[in-house]
């Protein structure tokens, strides 16, 4: 007859969980187009959030500088993407051009 200790050791051997090595994480690499599109989407979201705050809040001037900084960041990312020849989807390109037109 087996002791409790021996049975527990057998169970441990059967059900041991092996952790994956940390160095083997493989995250899908995004294309340069996708990276710049994500950056521009984040910048657009930031601009829209600031505009909403400006409409709702009473401190319009406090948000004005934040808005100009966010717009500058958007234009910088857009110029960098164009220099690298990044191609966006047609729908996203329309949104980007419309926002750029409103800023300038």
Image (cartoon, rainbow, N blue to C red):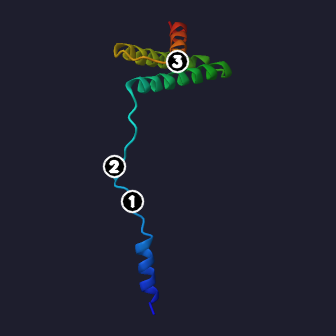
Q: CA distance from mark 2 to mark 3?
A: 34 Å
Q: Secondary structure at mark 3?
A: helix
In this image, 74 relative to 24: left or right?
Answer: right
Q: CA distance from mark 1 to mark 3?
A: 41 Å
Q: What is the quadrant of residue 2 in the picture?
A: bottom left
**Crowd band around label 3 with a 10 angstrom C-alpha radius: few (<14), some (14–19), many (20+):** some
Q: Which residue is mark 1?
A: 19
Rendered location of residue 83, percent (x, y):
34, 13
Sequence-first disc among 2 and 3: 2
13 w.r.t. 85: above or below: below
Q: What is the quadrant of residue 102 in the picture?
A: top right
Rendered location of residue 60, percent (x, y):
61, 17
Sequence-first disc among 1 and 3: 1
Q: Which residue is mark 3?
A: 92
**Crowd band around label 2 with a 10 angstrom C-alpha radius: few (<14), some (14–19), many (20+):** few
Q: Secondary structure at mark 2?
A: helix
Q: Pick the residue in front: 58 or 12.
A: 12
Q: Secondary structure at mark 1?
A: loop
Sequence-first disc among 2 and 1: 1
* Rendered image: mark on residue 78: none
Callout 1 touching callout 3 (CB < 8 Å): no
Q: Residue at x 55, y 15 (%)?
A: 95
Rendered location of residue 57, percent (x, y):
66, 22
Q: Which residue is mark 2?
A: 24
């Amino acid at each position: 007859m087996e002791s409790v200790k021996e049975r527990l050791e057998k169970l441990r051997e059967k059900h041991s969980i092996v952790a994956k090595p940390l160095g083997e994480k493989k995250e899908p690499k995004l294309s340069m187009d996708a990276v710049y599109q994500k950056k521009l989407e984040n910048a657009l979201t930031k601009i829209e959030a600031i505009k909403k705050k400006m409409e709702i809040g009473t401190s319009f001037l406090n948000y004005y500088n934040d808005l100009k900084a966010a717009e500058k960041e958007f234009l910088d990312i857009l110029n960098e993407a164009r220099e690298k020849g990044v191609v966006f989807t047609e729908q996203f390109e329309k949104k980007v051009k419309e926002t750029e037109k409103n800023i300038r």
